[in-house]
């Protein structure tokens, strides 16, 4: 059975049904633009795998530079019962606490080729070339796309290898396709001028779609922060806990527990929330592994209130390109009302904060298992 010989989604699906003697009628029921999805997003397409979409909110957020609050409703695509309800409770706690404050910083998308050099002398020669010809490399990158700017780089040598991490501003696109094409042009230029060959366009110095301390330390994509102080009244009425009890769980789980296990994420469930948001809004789900890296902190205030913050150093997202052009994902972005990737990143931080608050309180007051029995085991 040669799937590639079939030119339409329906023909491929019908062929599979006949060959495997299975019913694929649900996979074949979808509203997406078949031609666009099958040519831009998915090869050998046979249909659509659908995931339930829930809504959480309202969530009230303001930036550190603009104290005017904005209300958001959050689309979450998930098959995990209790997740949307949990985030919804966190949103309620934030709203009743006066809203969360958010901030962001664009680091840029990275691509990290590795070059094979003859010896240390040639490795140092490549290092000097990068320093002296960086403006030329910027021009080479810009020629591949006017939506992209090469902003900086970092490089390291080890043995007969030279690793370079090129960093690009890709505006509102997540941008990995753009930076890959630009980096390919750059390494060709370097080969032309120095004779030094690129061994692999990605040498894992990017670091793309993998957990990495380099990305935690340097950042990648967009860095985001969110914070809120939960009054004792909100802790008591909505979260059914106290500041001191919630602090104890945070310390034991997010700090000591993460250190004991060697975890790179000092948080409760960033990946849960980010995966649901990413799938809903057309992000690359593989970048969830990077979004899961981050630190949640808590601090007692006036012995009865609780300050909670989240820091995500590695959020690879966009509002244009890739899966964001699919009809359902575009509608989910419309629910959020965002067109700028940095604003979107700030919303993600706020939603992650809501998820952290809710799960920490649930763990403290013992409702985690009950919630999953109620929502997931029906």
Image (cartoon, grey):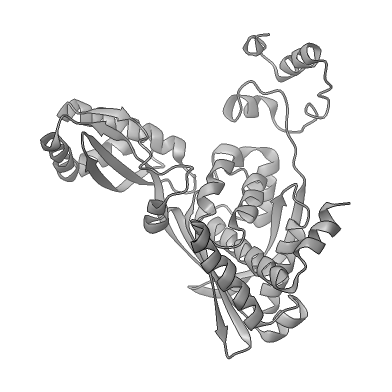
Residue 329 versus residue 48 in the image, above or below: below
Between 164 and 176, the one nearer to me in the picture:
164
The residue located at (82%, 29%) in the rendering is 26
Residue 340 in view of the camera: no
The location of residue 112, given as percent across then percent down, is 34, 40
Q: Residue furthest front?
A: 260
Q: Residue furthest left?
A: 121
Q: Residue furthest right?
A: 378
The location of residue 34, given as percent across then percent down, is 69, 26
The image quadrant of residue 73 is bottom right
Residue 339 versus residue 101 in the image, above or below: above
The residue located at (52%, 58%) in the rendering is 261
Q: Quadrant of the N terminus?
A: top right
Residue 46 falls left or right of residue 217: right
Residue 118 versus residue 136 in the image, above or below: above
The location of residue 217, given as percent across then percent down, is 38, 58
The location of residue 354, given as percent across then percent down, is 65, 66
The image quadrant of residue 180 is top left
The residue located at (19%, 28%) in the rendering is 196
């Amino acid at each position: 059975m040669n799937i590639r010989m079939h030119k339409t989604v329906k023909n491929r699906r019908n062929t599979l049904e006949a060959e495997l003697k299975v019913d694929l009628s649900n996979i074949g029921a979808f509203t997406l633009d078949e031609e666009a999805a099958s040519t831009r997003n998915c090869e050998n397409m046979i249909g659509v795998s659908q995931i339930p979409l829930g809504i959480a909110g309202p969530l009230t957020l303001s930036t550190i530079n603009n104290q005017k609050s904005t209300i958001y409703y959050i689309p979450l695509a998930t098959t995990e019962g209790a997740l949307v309800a949990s985030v919804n409770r966190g949103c309620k706690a934030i709203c009743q606490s006066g809203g969360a404050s958010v901030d962001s910083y664009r680091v840029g998308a990275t691509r990290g080729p590795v070059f094979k050099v003859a010896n240390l002398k040639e490795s140092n020669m490549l290092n000097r070339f990068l320093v002296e010809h960086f403006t030329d490399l910027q021009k080479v990158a810009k020629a591949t796309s006017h939506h992209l700017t090469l902003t900086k780089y970092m490089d390291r040598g080890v043995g007969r290898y030279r690793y370079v991490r090129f960093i690009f501003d890709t505006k509102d696109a997540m941008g990995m396709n753009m930076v890959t094409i630009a980096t390919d042009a750059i390494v060709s230029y370097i080969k032309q001028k120095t004779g030094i060959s690129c061994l692999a366009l990605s040498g894992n110095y990017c670091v793309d779609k993998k957990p990495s301390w380099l990305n935690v330390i340097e950042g990648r994509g967009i860095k985001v922060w969110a914070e809120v102080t939960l009054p004792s009244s909100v802790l008591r009425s909505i979260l059914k806990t106290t500041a001191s009890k919630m602090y104890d769980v945070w310390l034991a789980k997010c700090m000591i527990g993460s250190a004991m296990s060697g975890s790179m994420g000092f948080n409760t469930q960033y990946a849960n929330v980010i995966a649901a948001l990413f799938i809903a809004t057309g992000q690359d789900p593989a970048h969830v592994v990077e979004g899961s890296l981050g630190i949640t902190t808590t601090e007692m205030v006036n012995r009865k209130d609780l300050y909670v913050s989240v820091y995500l150093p590695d959020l690879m997202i966009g509002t244009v390109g890739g899966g964001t052009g699919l009809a359902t994902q575009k509608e989910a972005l419309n629910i959020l009302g965002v067109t700028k990737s940095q604003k979107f990143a700030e919303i993600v931080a706020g939603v992650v904060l809501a998820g952290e608050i809710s799960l920490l309180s649930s763990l403290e007051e013992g409702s985690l298992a009950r919630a999953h029995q109620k929502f997931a085991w029906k």
